[in-house]
């Protein structure tokens, strides 16, 4: 819990809570083990036996590739016409993060690029939260159903010249290397991505369009995060920093297409989606090109007529994915389990736990909650969970800023990343890449990029001794 009277310059002012037995099982009774292997797409441990076919039906829809319309198998067509990947778990491999290429010759696949224009905020449509690029929209789709793209025989520009539907562009990342020096003299190599878009096939982007590189986050424990009581998060928010701890978390206000109103945002790297319905519906429409009742449009913008003219996979109601199948994937996504803690008895891990609190990490990475009641998911309700996030927006300073507002989030605000499972990203699927754009190759690099509201905590971290820093990192990796 937050210390009532904690000052940035007084590490001793932060209280270190006694170890609680429930910390070993961060997802409460839903927590799973690491055998036979670590994965974030395992079913929660206490899932009702009779509902298991339901989970696996949703998993199949999230895992098997979608195909171009029309096909004989009506239920799985409608891919694209432009898209980023054919299936949810193609990016969130085993439910984990996506892989950020380490060279500038490998096109982005799981990570994606968001776009919007920075214009008069009055003009932002209330249901969109951003002003999209007029031609390319608000997400760059780097794949298309065109045969010559599928075969990788032509570039997007050549495909466009032949009148077929090209991918919008190919995206690559160049890494700018820099080095960080600790007060004790030791050095750490850091890298920062520079986006490189090639073969943009639909003409120029608007002059004021901003681009934001996003690595896919891990998606375990989502149903539990959704059940954190709204009042708990509202109580942690301190927009005007009344308690003067230098940290002013805010809730984003994001559009809910079901209730047709703005609601506190929880999901997405800038908390721009209020519910799992909305994040999964938008992923289908924008990432895979599968229209659904929440996001009924194809990913083509009004200025992409060849894209709009392609055959769609719509059913009689006008959607490629009906509500009942969408619901299966939402339920699957809510029930992917959080793994158990490791190395709890290690001396470094317990010393690191103390340092985590003393440096003030918990001011944003709020350790624990009790989930609220849930008539639909009684097995997820009333659990003592340890996600280490306040799900609030924080200004992280110019080093991490993307300059791209989204609903109420500014161009330098990000949602506090949950830390449960943070030591397992590499083990789950090889994608040990941290922060919103995957620039950090370790927990240590991720901490060093913390600025803005987190500058005081980062400052206390770098002034620890080398062995204390390693202990703190080992604690984070045990989560
Ligand atoms: C092209 C890769 C890609 C595909 C395909 C994809 N995602 Fe994602 N996913 C991402 C990225 C990138 C983000 C972060 C987006 C952001 O906030 O800008 C994300 C965010 C999420 C989140 C929010 C996690 C959080 O911590 O708030 C969930 C849940 C999610 N995706 C589920 C899905 C589901 C379900 C599907 C399939 C319907 C899917 N995704 C398809 C890349 C992908
Ligand atoms: C002011 C709030 C704040 C404080 C204090 C803070 N963090 Fe963070 N942390 C964030 C936000 C916001 C992000 C996401 C930033 C991004 O993606 O660019 C983040 C991301 C991270 C990540 C990357 C997780 C991932 O999955 O990519 C790690 C690791 C982390 N923090 C550890 C720490 C540690 C350790 C401390 C204490 C030394 C700390 N943080 C203090 C807000 C904070």
Image (cartoon, rainbow, N blue to C red):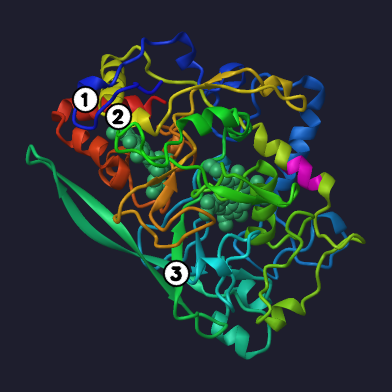
Query: Badges 2 and 1: C-beta atoms under 8 Å apart?
Result: yes
Q: Is the CB of the residue bearing disc 3 within 8 angstroms of ligand 1?
A: no
Residue receiving disc 1: 11
Residue receiving disc 3: 210
Q: Quadrant of residue 4?
A: top left
Q: Please tell me how crowded label 1 is: few (under 14), some (14-19), or many (20+) other residues with Cα within 10 Å.
A: some
Per the rendering, the mark at residue 220 is none
Q: Main secondary structure of the magenta part?
A: helix
Return the x and y of residue 135 as percentages of the image width and height.
59, 79
Asked whether residue 61 is in view, the answer is: yes
Q: Quadrant of residue 10?
A: top left
Q: Is the CB of the residue bearing disc 2 within 8 angstroms of ligand 2?
A: yes
Q: Nearer the viewer, residue 39 or 464?
A: 464
Question: Which residue does the image show at 77% across and 24% down from the upper left?
Answer: 375
Q: Nearer the viewer, residue 148 or 354?
A: 354
Question: Which residue does the image show at 21% across and 20% down from the upper left?
Answer: 12
Taking 343 as reference, is 218 above or below it? below
Asked whether residue 435 is in view, the answer is: no
Q: Earlier in the sequence, mark 3 or mark 1?
A: 1
Q: Find out whether residue 331 is within the magenta segment.
A: no
Say which element carries label 1.
Answer: helix
Q: Please tell me how crowded label 3 is: few (under 14), some (14-19), or many (20+) other residues with Cα within 10 Å.
A: many
Residue receiving disc 2: 360
Taking 199 as reference, is 381 above or below it? above
Is residue 210 found left or right of 162 in the rendered image? left
Q: Please tell me how crowded label 2 is: few (under 14), some (14-19), or many (20+) other residues with Cα within 10 Å.
A: many
Question: Which residue does the image show at 55% across and 74% down from the upper left?
Answer: 133
Extreme left residue here?
185
What residue span does the magenta drawing correspond to? 325-329
Say which element carries label 2.
Answer: loop
Say which element carries label 3.
Answer: strand
């Amino acid at each position: 819990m937050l210390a009532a009277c904690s000052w940035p310059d007084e590490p001793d002012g932060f209280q270190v809570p006694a170890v609680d037995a429930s910390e070993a099982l961060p997802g409460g009774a839903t927590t799973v083990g690491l055998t036979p292997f670590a994965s974030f797409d395992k079913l929660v441990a206490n899932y009702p036996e009779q509902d298991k076919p339901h989970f696996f039906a949703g998993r199949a829809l999230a895992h098997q590739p979608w195909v171009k319309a029309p096909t004989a198998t009506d239920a799985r067509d409608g891919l694209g016409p432009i898209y980023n990947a054919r299936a949810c778990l193609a990016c969130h491999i085993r439910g984990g993060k996506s892989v950020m290429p380490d060279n500038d010759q490998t096109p982005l696949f799981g990570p994606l690029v968001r776009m919007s224009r920075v214009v008069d905020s009055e003009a932002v449509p209330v249901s969109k939260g951003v002003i999209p690029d007029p031609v390319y929209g608000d997400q760059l789709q780097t794949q298309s159903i065109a045969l010559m793209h599928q075969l990788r025989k032509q570039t997007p520009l050549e495909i466009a010249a032949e009148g077929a539907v090209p991918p919008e562009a190919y995206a690559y990342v160049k890494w700018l290397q820099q080095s960080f020096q600790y007060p004790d003299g030791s050095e750490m190599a850091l890298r920062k991505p520079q986006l490189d878009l090639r073969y943009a096939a639909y003409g120029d982007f608007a002059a004021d369009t901003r681009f934001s590189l996003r690595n896919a986050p891990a998606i375990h424990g989502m149903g539990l995060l959704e059940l954190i009581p709204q009042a708990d998060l509202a109580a942690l928010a301190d927009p005007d920093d009344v308690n003067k701890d230098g940290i002013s978390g805010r809730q984003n206000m994001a559009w809910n297409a079901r209730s047709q109103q703005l609601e506190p945002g929880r999901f997405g790297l800038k908390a721009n989606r209020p519910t799992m319905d909305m994040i999964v519906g938008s992923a289908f429409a924008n990432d895979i090109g599968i229209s659904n009742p929440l996001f009924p449009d194809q990913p083509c913008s009004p200025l992409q007529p060849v894209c709009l003219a392609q055959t769609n996979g719509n059913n009689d109601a006008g959607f490629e994915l009906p509500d009942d199948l969408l619901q299966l994937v939402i339920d699957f996504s809510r029930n992917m389990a959080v793994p158990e803690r490791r190395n709890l008895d290690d001396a470094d891990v317990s010393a690191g736990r103390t340092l985590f609190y003393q440096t003030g990490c918990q001011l944003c990475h709020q350790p624990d909650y009790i989930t609220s009641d849930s008539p639909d998911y009684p097995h997820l309700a009333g659990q003592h969970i340890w996600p280490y996030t306040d799900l609030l927006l924080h200004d992280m300073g110019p080093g991490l800023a993307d300059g791209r507002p989204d609903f109420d989030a500014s161009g330098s605000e990000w949602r506090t990343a949950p830390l449960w499972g943070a030591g397992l990203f590499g083990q789950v699927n090889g994608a040990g890449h941290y922060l919103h754009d995957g620039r950090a190759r370790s927990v240590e690099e991720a901490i060093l990029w913390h600025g803005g509201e987190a500058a005081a905590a980062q400052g206390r971290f770098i002034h620890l001794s080398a062995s204390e820093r390693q202990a703190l990192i080992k604690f984070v990796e045990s989560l």
